[in-house]
Image: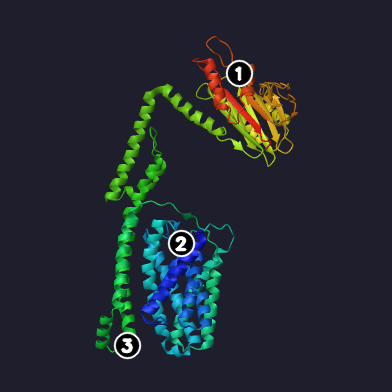
């Protein structure tokens, strides 16, 4: 089943079961009378599943309202506003606020998220109860005298059931990883405008509440208030979600502490609802006090909510203090993990800056911060001494290892496979780093650049020249597509400040998949092997001169039809020697490719053949191969 469809169907089913189930269980109680937990489910389903959850829950609630006998016009208006309230919880959660560590999927793992969660419940609960009280006032004149009572019923039911469903639902959605996470919007919008709309929406609720309880209500004013609240609500809901959403899941100390706190809160809410729905207790209080049974239920729910609020405020204050004084320092200390690498110094500047604000504290955190700072200092001094003891040889070895990784990372690591061609390559330096390189990349939708080079000498100097050449070729191809002109410009650049008289051979080609032609230019490199009429041959091409020796040399651009395959290589392959001082040679290379008839990659088989030819002879030159196969199917 499609995820989006699930996010509609599951809320629909939950709302139908809870709404009608409680309704029939309480023998058809309407207008917020008795327990109405489905109203709190609205905001939680919207929070977890976004617009899909809000839609599914609201459609189910609309059907339930019609079944329960509410007027169709009331049910429809209720559904519209209910969708707005449900979707509002989702929008508020994925907004960024000052003091909130990060925006994440619904998780009650720190005090900021818990405060936001209860804040959303209170705002949405006030909005829902106020709107529905006004709707009943307009459409059910018989309920005018109890409008305040209806609003209070809905508000208490909303916040209590939202707290229960929210704590359970968020915990469950985290465990099964089923929640709707919005994509970050790149749409430009006026942030200040939406802040004003949000403030006005809250103020409208406060002002409406004050006016309703200060001035006698009338239909016209109620209608105007509903219109204003509706405009502000749905205007605010248009705000794009632009926060970076943190999705990494891991076990944390704050979350473990928060789970204990939430479990206690959940127990208190459920206990309050059980008391408020206990028939024997309600009857006893009703007989004892001069108030109606409905007022007894509301009073008990309100009393339990006040107790919970008394519990929440100091608890959250203590938890926030623990987060600030204990958890945040520990999380800061844990950042050392990103700075620790085997046999390397710890980058102390960033860490010391993190620990510095705790160093002067006289608590255990201060002791830990000072210990960490000393540990970093001692570790770095130790590593530094070890490096000195190892001497120059080990220093050079370490640098060469890094250079090897850098050089390897500059070469293509994966073949390019399309419907038109397959291109791949291989390079193995004779030492830690070498002077050979190959490269291939798509210049645009039609053209593929292929290049191979061999710098004079071996080791670090040759590697630097090869890497410099590779970067320069890529840059020049951004503005120039004629291979000979690229080599001309490249040659002049390499000739500048070439005090060591180093040079590099290079073959540069551009293959066009539409024309199946390759244009190329050569700077003293070995001629390629080209497959024509199912046979590999060495075509006659202009040899050119190596790069870096003579300025302003005019290279030649040549063109060739390429319908099957081309193989490029460096002399490390053809000049590979065996114990008898015999070279592998170009003839053996062409013979290998002519007898290699299968469609597998030829690199490994070729290396095995060269290894058999050279036997135990040490590789004395860099070996590089690049091939391009044209697909004609």
Please tell me whether residue 569 is drawn above or below residue 326 in the rendered image: above
Please rate how many residues cluster around mark 3, counting C-alpha atoms within 10 Å: few if below 14, some from 14 to 19, many from 20. some
Q: Is residue 131 visible?
A: no
Residue sitting nearer the eye, 369 or 280: 280
> Between disc 3 and disc 1, whose residue precedes?
3
On the image, numbered disc 3 is attached to which residue? Answer: 292
Labels 2 & 3 near each other (Cβ < 8 A): no
Residue 477 position within the rendered picture, expressed as x and y whole percent measured from the top left: 68, 35
Please rate how many residues cluster around mark 2, counting C-alpha atoms within 10 Å: few if below 14, some from 14 to 19, many from 20. few
Q: Nearer the viewer, mark 2 or mark 3?
A: 3
On the image, numbered disc 2 is attached to which residue? Answer: 97
> Between disc 2 and disc 3, whose residue precedes?
2
Q: Nearer the viewer, mark 2 or mark 1?
A: 1
Residue 46 position within the rendered picture, expressed as x and y whole percent measured from the top left: 47, 67
Q: Is residue 18 visible?
A: yes
Mark 2–mark 1 Cα distance, whole angstroms, equals 66 Å
Mark 3–mark 1 Cα distance, whole angstroms, equals 102 Å
**SS category of the residue bearing label 3:** loop
Residue 557, image quadrant = top right
For the point 56% across and 70% down, which residue is it?
A: 235
> Between disc 2 and disc 1, whose residue precedes?
2
On the image, numbered disc 1 is attached to which residue? Answer: 574
For the point 54% across and 13% down, which residue is it?
A: 578
**SS category of the residue bearing label 2:** loop
Labels 2 & 1 near each other (Cβ < 8 A): no
**SS category of the residue bearing label 1:** helix
Residue 396 position within the rendered picture, expressed as x and y whole percent measured from the top left: 46, 24
Instruction: Give left or right: position of 94 versus 164.
Output: right
Q: Which mark is residue 143?
A: none
Please rate how many residues cluster around mark 1, counting C-alpha atoms within 10 Å: few if below 14, some from 14 to 19, many from 20. some
Residue 449 position within the rendered picture, expressed as x and y whole percent measured from the top left: 66, 34
Mark 2–mark 3 Cα distance, whole angstroms, equals 43 Å
């Amino acid at each position: 089943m499609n995820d989006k469809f699930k996010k509609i169907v599951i809320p629909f089913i939950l709302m139908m079961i809870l709404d009608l189930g409680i309704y029939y269980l309480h023998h058809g109680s309407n207008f917020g009378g008795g327990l109405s937990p489905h109203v709190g489910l609205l905001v939680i389903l919207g929070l977890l599943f976004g617009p899909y959850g809000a839609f599914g829950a609201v459609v189910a609630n609309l059907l339930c309202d019609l079944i329960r006998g509410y007027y169709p016009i009331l049910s429809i208006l209720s559904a519209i506003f209910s969708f707005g309230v449900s979707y509002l919880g989702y929008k508020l959660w994925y907004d960024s606020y000052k003091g909130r560590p990060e925006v994440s999927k619904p998780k009650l793992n720190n005090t900021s998220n818990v405060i936001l969660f209860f804040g959303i419940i209170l705002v949405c609960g006030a909005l829902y109860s106020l709107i529905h009280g006004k709707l009943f006032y307009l459409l059910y004149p018989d309920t005018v005298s109890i409008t305040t009572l209806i609003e209070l019923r809905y508000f208490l039911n909303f916040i209590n059931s939202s707290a229960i469903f929210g704590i359970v639902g968020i915990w469950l959605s985290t465990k099964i990883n089923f929640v709707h996470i919005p994509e970050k919007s790149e749409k430009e919008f006026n942030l200040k405008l939406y802040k004003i709309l949000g403030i006005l929406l809250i103020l409208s609720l406060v002002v409406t509440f004050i006016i309703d309880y200060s001035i006698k209500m009338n239909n016209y004013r109620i209608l105007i208030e509903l219109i204003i609240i509706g405009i502000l609500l749905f205007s605010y809901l248009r705000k794009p979600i632009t926060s970076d959403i943190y999705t990494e899941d891991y076990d944390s100390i704050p979350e473990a502490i928060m789970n204990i706190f939430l479990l206690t809160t959940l127990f208190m809410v459920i206990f309050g609802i059980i008391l408020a729905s206990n028939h024997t207790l309600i009857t006893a209080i009703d007989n004892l006090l001069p108030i109606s049974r409905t007022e007894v239920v509301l009073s008990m729910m309100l009393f339990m909510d006040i107790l919970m609020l008394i519990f929440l405020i100091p608890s959250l204050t203590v938890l926030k203090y623990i987060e600030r004084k204990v958890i945040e320092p520990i999380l800061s200390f844990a950042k050392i993990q990103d700075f620790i690498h085997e046999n390397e110094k710890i980058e102390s500047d960033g860490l010391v800056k993190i620990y510095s604000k705790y160093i002067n504290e006289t608590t255990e955190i201060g002791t830990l911060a000072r210990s960490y700072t000393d540990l970093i200092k001692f570790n770095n001094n130790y590593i530094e001494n070890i490096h000195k003891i190892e001497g120059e040889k080990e220093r050079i070895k370490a640098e060469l290892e890094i250079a090897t990784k850098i050089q390897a990372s500059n070469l293509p690591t994966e073949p390019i496979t399309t419907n038109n061609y397959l291109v791949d390559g291989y390079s193995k330096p004779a030492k830690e780093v070498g002077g050979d390189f190959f490269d291939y990349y798509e210049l645009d939708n039609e053209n593929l650049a292929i290049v191979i080079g061999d710098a004079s000498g071996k080791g670090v100097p040759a590697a630097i020249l090869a890497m410099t050449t590779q970067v320069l070729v890529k840059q020049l191809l951004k503005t120039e597509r004629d291979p000979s002109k690229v080599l001309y410009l490249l040659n002049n650049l390499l000739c500048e400040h070439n005090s060591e008289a180093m040079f590099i051979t290079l073959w540069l080609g551009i293959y066009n998949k539409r024309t199946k032609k390759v244009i190329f230019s050569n700077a003293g490199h070995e001629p390629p092997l080209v497959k024509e009429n199912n046979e590999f041959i060495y075509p006659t091409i202009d040899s050119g001169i190596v790069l870096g020796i003579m300025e302003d040399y005019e290279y030649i651009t040549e063109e060739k039809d390429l319908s099957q395959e081309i193989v490029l290589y460096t002399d490390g392959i053809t000049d590979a020697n065996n114990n008898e001082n015999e070279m592998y040679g170009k003839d053996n290379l062409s013979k290998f490719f002519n007898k290699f008839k299968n469609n597998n990659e030829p690199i490994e088989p070729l290396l095995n053949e060269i290894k058999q030819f050279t036997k135990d002879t040490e590789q004395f030159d860099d070996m590089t191969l690049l091939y391009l196969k044209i697909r004609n199917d």
